[in-house]
Amino acid sequence: MSPKSNGAFSDFMEGLEQRNPHETEFIQAVRDVAHSVFPVLEENKDYQDAKILERMTEPDRIISFRVSWEDDEKNVRVNRAWRVQFNRAIGPYKGGLRFHSSVNQSILKFLGFEQTFKNSLTDLPMGGGKGGSNFNPKGKSSREVMRFCQSFMTELFRHIGPDADVPAGDIGVGAREIGFLFGQYTRLTNEFEGALTGKGLTYGGSPIRKEATGYGAIYFLQCMLARADEPLEGKRLAISGAGNVALFAAERSVQEGAKVVTLSDSDGFIHCSSGLDEEALEGIKALKLEERGRLSELADRVKGIEYVAGKAPWGVECDVAIPCATQNELDGDAARTLVGNGLRAVVEGANMPSTDEAIQCFRENGVIFGPGKAGNAGGVAVSGFEQSQNAARLSWSREDVNARLKSLMQTIHEKCADEMERDEGIDYVDAANRAGFRKVADAMLAYGVT
Ligand code: NDP
């Protein structure tokens, strides 16, 4: 960045921090993008005059609402919920719903902001949005989750629709929750339409949607490794998380001949130094996705697995780290430990799982680093395919969707590689930010001042 650009960047960030006090996650996400795109702004007076970045960092609107529901003991419970409709320049708002006790407006703003650039990278007509609630489905009965989802949708339904805003799943919102939410949406609107993605296959869902984020991350990793002339086969992969993204990243990795040596949940991690086989992985998927069990139960069930309580998996020797749990789960200390153990590459399955310090450490040590915006875009891409199938009242085959997903991840990688050729001083982080930014910025310019 030129000294002039550097000064403008500092002024911009100071203003943003003043306007959004205490929103640490949102500020972190904006800093990452702004740092990458300031040199692009410097070259483009139209972007500067139109105050594109200032406008892009204010959500179009935030809907905030109360969700009241009754638990199994007949107690009235109250939660807070939001839908952040961040940017609609290139299509209807699109992004997941998160149900977790940590959810607040800052986290949803960071996720909605990130989603805008990720969706742009897919080249599908999708704007950016995100929503959720501080409701925690863990430990709740299915009936309690259903009553919560119905109450949540009773407020949200008036703000969404196939051409307006199309939510999907995220942490704590999987197939079961999407079923409850969509069931209530069709009841309230008297319409059967693609206003949510991640639906079950019997009611408008797409094949490969649940696998898409994890599979897509591995396809992107393969592209990054191929560019560096390295194979995926035989590499040891430390994966965090044991949810939708982590489990299908693990499944694809094993199918591609890599060794998955860890998975984790918020209580600890499992370690299998020889790599999980397909049978062990099927058992883990059943435990996590169907029985809703904990990884701590596995050491007794599966041979060759060690369970380590209370720790993240980053101390384990591996060639590739794939954080797939949550934001800021991989910090500077973890990054230094991984690098000390010979780490070659990182691809982010989760959104913003690496802290700024961790990314800096990877940069300084020549680790190939694929940011979540590019690496985990496969999920929303197949959500886009689900919207297309719903609109055309068609159903594509599993093979077809998987082939489209793979090709789309390769295209995202090519876009990043093109940016890196255009400016040799940048890496995948800057490249993904710039490629995502240009398309949204040009659409906003075309609309005039809105
Ligand atoms: P799930 O709820 O299915 O799984 C999340 C996993 O991460 C669980 O194993 C959970 O453990 C663990 N986890 C969550 N919070 C923490 C925490 N604070 N500390 C340690 N572990 C934690 O979510 P997904 O797999 O859908 O999402 C994971 C990440 O991927 C998120 O960042 C999400 O935004 C991102 N993402 C998801 C997409 C999707 O298609 N689902 C698309 C793109 C990105 P526990 O059960 O103990 O809470």
Image: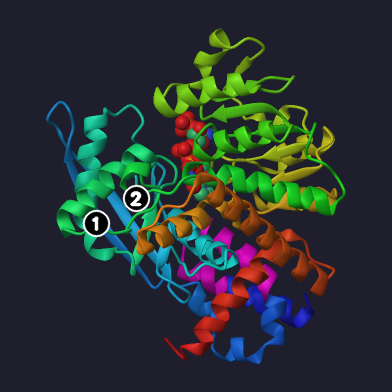
N-terminal label among 2 and 1: 1
Q: Residue at x 61, y 69 (%)?
A: 436
Q: Secondary structure at mark 1?
A: loop
Quadrant where the C terminus sits is bottom left
Q: Is residue 150 magenta?
A: no
Expressed as whole percent of the image width and height from the top left, the position of residue 207 reads: 46, 45
Q: Is residue 155 left or right of residue 108?
A: left
Q: Secondary structure at mark 2?
A: loop
Q: Is mark 1 within 8 Å of ligand 1?
A: no
Q: Residue at x 56, y 37 (%)?
A: 248
Residue 338 visible in rendering:
yes
Amino acid type, mark 1: Phe
| The label number, if any, that marks residue 204 in the structure image | 2
Front position in the image: 392 or 151 = 392
Amino acid type, mark 2: Gly
Front position in the image: 229 or 316 = 229
Q: Is residue 196 left or right of residue 331?
A: left
Please rate how many residues cluster around mark 1, counting C-alpha atoms within 10 Å: few if below 14, some from 14 to 19, many from 20: some
Span highlighted in magenta in the image: 14-37
- Which residue bears the numbered disc 1? 192
Q: Residue at x 50, y 59 (%)?
A: 110
Q: Is residue 20 magenta?
A: yes
Q: Are marks 2 and 1 in contact (CB under 8 Å)?
A: yes
